[in-house]
């Protein structure tokens, strides 16, 4: 199966918790500092990840979140083109997988989720750039 359709390279005891300090970059502190420096400026977080990840702290600190998955070498330009105001471009996106609430929720049942399991964004959740 393709990497993004299952838990990928995660092996016990690893979880799907987003590591905000990967590569020496502390994403949470960067977002907190930006929020403090410019309280009125919206923060859009773009997650480049091969699977849904438990990133609740980052999601809660952001005004908007885009799950960009693994877009390839030109993905950054394409994402920037639709996010920058004035380009006239629109996009819509729907989740192809249930988004996790907790770090051990790697078995949410994929497209359908699991009855009674809390999730911030269920399968099929999504918006358009102009329809939010």
Image (spheres, rainbow, N blue to C red):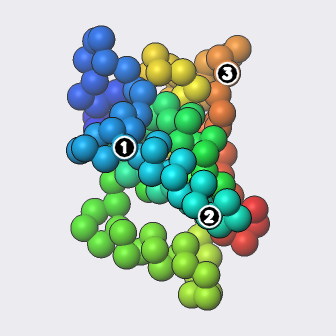
**Cβ atoms at labels 1 and 3 below 8 Å apart:** no
Disc 2 crowd, CA 10 A, few/some/many (<14, 14-19, 20+): few
- Please state which of residues 62 and 31 is positioned toward the viewer in this rendering: 31
Which residue does the numbered mark 2 point to in the structure image? 38
Disc 3 crowd, CA 10 A, few/some/many (<14, 14-19, 20+): some
Q: Compared to 98, does 80 lie above or below?
A: below
Residue 132, image x and y in percent? Answer: 75, 62
**Residue shown at 54%/28% (left/top)?**
100
Mark 3 residue element: loop
Mark 2 residue element: loop
Residue 118, image x and y in percent? Answer: 67, 21
Q: CA distance from mark 1 to mark 3?
A: 27 Å
Q: Which mark is residue 108?
A: none
- Please state which of residues 131 and 35 is positioned toward the viewer in this rendering: 35
Which residue does the numbered mark 1 point to in the structure image? 26
Q: CA distance from mark 2 to mark 1?
A: 18 Å
Q: Compared to 110, does 79 lie above or below?
A: below
Q: Earlier in the sequence, mark 2 or mark 1?
A: 1
**Is residue 32 in view from this perspective?**
yes
- Please state which of residues 25 and 70 is positioned toward the viewer in this rendering: 25
Residue 83, image x and y in percent? Answer: 55, 73
Q: Earlier in the sequence, mark 2 or mark 3?
A: 2
**Cβ atoms at labels 2 and 1 below 8 Å apart:** no
**Residue shown at 36%/69% (left/top)?**
76
Q: Quadrant of residue 112?
A: top right
Which residue does the numbered mark 3 point to in the structure image? 118
**Residue shown at 61%/81% (left/top)?**
85
Q: Compared to 61, does 63 lie above or below?
A: below
Q: CA distance from mark 2 to mark 3?
A: 33 Å
Q: Earlier in the sequence, mark 1 or mark 3?
A: 1
State which mark lies toward you, 1 or 3: 1
């Amino acid at each position: 199966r393709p990497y993004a359709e299952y838990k990928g390279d995660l092996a016990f005891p690893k979880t799907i918790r987003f590591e905000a300090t990967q590569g020496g970059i502390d994403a949470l502190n960067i977002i907190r500092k930006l929020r403090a420096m410019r309280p009125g400026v919206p923060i859009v977080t773009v997650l480049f990840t091969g699977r849904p990840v438990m990133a609740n702290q980052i999601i809660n600190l952001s005004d908007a979140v885009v799950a960009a998955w693994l877009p390839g070498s030109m993905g950054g330009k394409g994402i920037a083109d639709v996010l920058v105001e004035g380009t006239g471009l629109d996009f819509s996106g729907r989740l192809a997988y249930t988004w996790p609430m907790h770090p051990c929720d790697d078995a949410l049942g994929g497209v359908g989720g699991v009855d009674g399991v809390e999730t911030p964004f269920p399968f099929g959740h999504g918006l358009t750039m102009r329809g939010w």
